[in-house]
Image: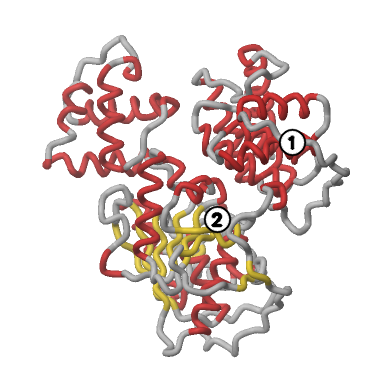
Amino acid sequence: MGHRSQVPLEQRPVWAEFQRSFHDWTGIRLAQSAASTAADLLHQRADALGEDVDSYVESLSRFDRLAERRLLIDALVVNTTWFMREEQGLMALADALTDIAKGLSEPRPLKVWCAGCSSGQEPYGLAILLEQAGVEAEIVATDISESVLKKARGAEYTEAEVRSMSRLVRSYAPKVPGGETYRMSDAIRSRVTFELHNLARPPHAPMKYRPLDAIVCRNLLIYFDRQLAVDIVDQFGAALNQDQGFVLLGAAEQPLVWLSKRLQPVLTYAGTLLRSRNYGRPIEMSRGVMRTGEFKAASPGQSRPTSPPRRRRKTREIPYLPARLSDVVAADDPPAPKPPRPKDRLFPVDVRQTMEAARRAHREGDQERGLELVDAVLARDRLIAEAHLLRGLMLKEQGRTKAATEALRNARFLSGDDAWMAPYQLGLVLEVTGDHPGAREAYRHAIVVIDAGGTSGMRDADFDDVAFAPTVAAACRARLASLKR
């Protein structure tokens, strides 16, 4: 057994060396908050091989340590997922693919790639929606972790994993006879192929499946360096069928849309659904017309009945960008009052001064004026995390929860592991809207940032970051305990 240093691993050069290596392997930069878990694992593996941890980490670059690298990747890559996560985004994509299938001059299976598929719930969920819509599709699902791919191929899930399933999904995952698990039906499993793939390594999209009709990559790029994430999104655009193709990112990854050179958004309130900038015609999209449980599911193993009727709202072409960001509000959000605005009321052109004025308006309770000012800032620079945070707080106070959720997700993405106010406030909003898994994830993120010494992310706040942070951490832990009950 190797000798253990009295100095914690995360305070030694070997930790920085391992962070760099892990980033090279996966594209993911391990946060400082992961140091304790990673240190325990590295010591365990070094002890098992009779080495000290420094020598073990150095040896990981060798070809004969490939199995060790895969073991570490399996253990440290976040594989959180569940059936119909961010459901509206999946339904919007299924709706878009249905329109593509109907417009084909010669019928063919659509080609869909799910990147970072984890244990399979996402591609299987999409396969079910496409089955229900009568769309033939070949879905390839990839992940960097061999252990989660093994589970995905087995398509067998525990009671806890299927608890959140709708009746639609459950009808395709019957209980295993004589067992306690649930297994996806052969009809759905046959639609999905699983492969090992490292998204961070070129080619970012598997060559043999190009051109693709759709790419799904949600809640993965938030762990990547921003520039690499942008490069990958642009590569997604290059891998699409340029006549008709879509990318679905997670709702938290919307800032990548603004940085992409190849893609443009179609809608942003139901996940982030993108299409190629080369798309040749306007598209009419219904706003999440595929509602789970709207029609009866076909029994697995039986021939599929005629495509069920699909209720559609009046469609309209969705513009590339709204005139004002505060106009992007979900249909069921209560309209905010818009008092008359004097004609001579002009926004300051200086971003710093405008942000100061927005903070002042927020403190004085003039949320409408504050939103106008923040929108002016974001019209000039969409990558200012505090502007999205302030916007989310004001929308939250107006009761516009869905628009607040979008703004707070943007703030969380842009501030990363440096600021805790955005994930804390996001957790509060998600809890109110019933997204308890998302709320728990946000609360945990806030705690991690606070424990690492992060700031609130708000300048000139009327509280002291250092003094207030423990209170927020305690509140997050209390909410996590409540959500477990």
Q: Residue at x 26, y 69 (%)?
A: 208
Q: CA distance from mark 1 to mark 2?
A: 32 Å
Q: Is residue 353 above or below residue 206?
A: above
Q: How many marks?
A: 2
- Residue at x 60%, y 86% (from the top left corner): 307
Element marked by disc 1: loop
87 relative to 423, above or below: below
Amino acid, disc 1 = Leu
Q: Residues within 10 Å of mark 2 (few under 14, many from 20)?
A: many
Q: Position of residue 49 (x, y in %)?
A: 17, 30
Task: Answer with left or right where residue 240 lies relative to residue 435.
Answer: left
Residue at disc 2, secondary structure: strand
Question: Residue 121's spot in the image, x, y percent?
Answer: 49, 60
Can I make out residue 123 in this image?
yes
- In what quadrant of the picture does the C terminus appear? top right
State the mark number for residue 272: 2
For residue 396, which numbered disc appears in the image?
A: none
Q: Position of residue 419 (x, y in %)?
A: 56, 27
Residue 161 or residue 422, whichever sits in front: 422
Please tell me whether residue 186 is drawn above or below residue 48 in the rendered image: below
Q: Could you tell me if residue 481 is visible in this image? A: no
Near-viewer residue (239 or 347):
347
Q: Which label lies toward us, 1 or 2?
A: 1
Q: Quadrant of residue 484?
A: top right
Residue at the spot of label 1: 346
* Residue extending furthest toward the front: 344
Drawn side of residue 73 relative to residue 255, left or right = left
